[in-house]
Image (spheres, rainbow, N blue to C red):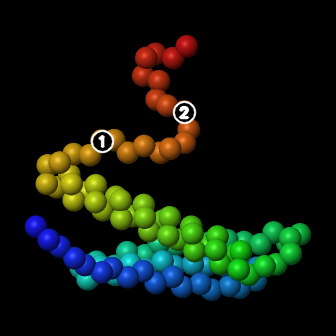
Amino acid sequence: MSHAEEWKVGVYLIEEDGATEARAVLETGKDTLVGRGRARCNPQDVEVPAIGDELAASRAMRDLAGQLSRAADKDLAALGAVPEAPRTGYGWPDDSGGGR
């Protein structure tokens, strides 16, 4: 089965008072997902707008990626294909063996 689609993501940045807000908007043709990110310049640092843009945009895209992944998990569960439990990638592993 062959399938081709094009999804577009627009990234919108607004900088104000040393902070950058970003929105990453994904249009799939069926749904719209919006990721959000923020970066703030430390008042003691030299202000370099490009760095704030990069940080805020990356955080917005990370948020968007998480939403898209959760949507896929819901769709898989609705079809009866249960994905394995989500992993956080940080923190201590669950010690269900009773501890120390």
Viewer-proximal residue among 2 and 56: 2
Q: Amino acid at mark 2?
A: Trp
Q: Quadrant of the N terminus?
A: bottom left
Which disc is residue 64 wearing? Answer: none
Residue 32: x and y, percent? 34, 79
| Farthest residue, direction front | 2
Q: Earlier in the sequence, mark 2 or mark 1?
A: 1
* Residue sitting at x 64%, y 70%: 55
Residue 74 position by quadrant? bottom left
Q: Residue at x 17, y 48 (%)?
A: 81
Q: Is residue 28 above or below residue 71?
A: below
Q: Is residue 100 above or below residue 23?
A: above
Secondary-structure class at tag 1: loop
Tell me, for residue 92, which label it has, or none.
2
- The residues tagged by marks 2 and 1 sit, at their Cα atoms, a distance apart of 18 Å
Which residue occupies 57% across, 78% down? 22
Give the percent coordinates (x, y) of residue 47.
Answer: 82, 78
Element type at mark 2: loop
Question: Mark 1 is on which residue type?
Answer: Glu
Q: Position of residue 76 (x, y in %)?
A: 21, 54
Q: Quadrant of residue 4?
A: bottom left
In the rendered image, which residue does mark 1 sit on? 84
User: Image check: 22 left or right of 86?
Assistant: right
Residue in the image at 86% along x and 70% along y = 45
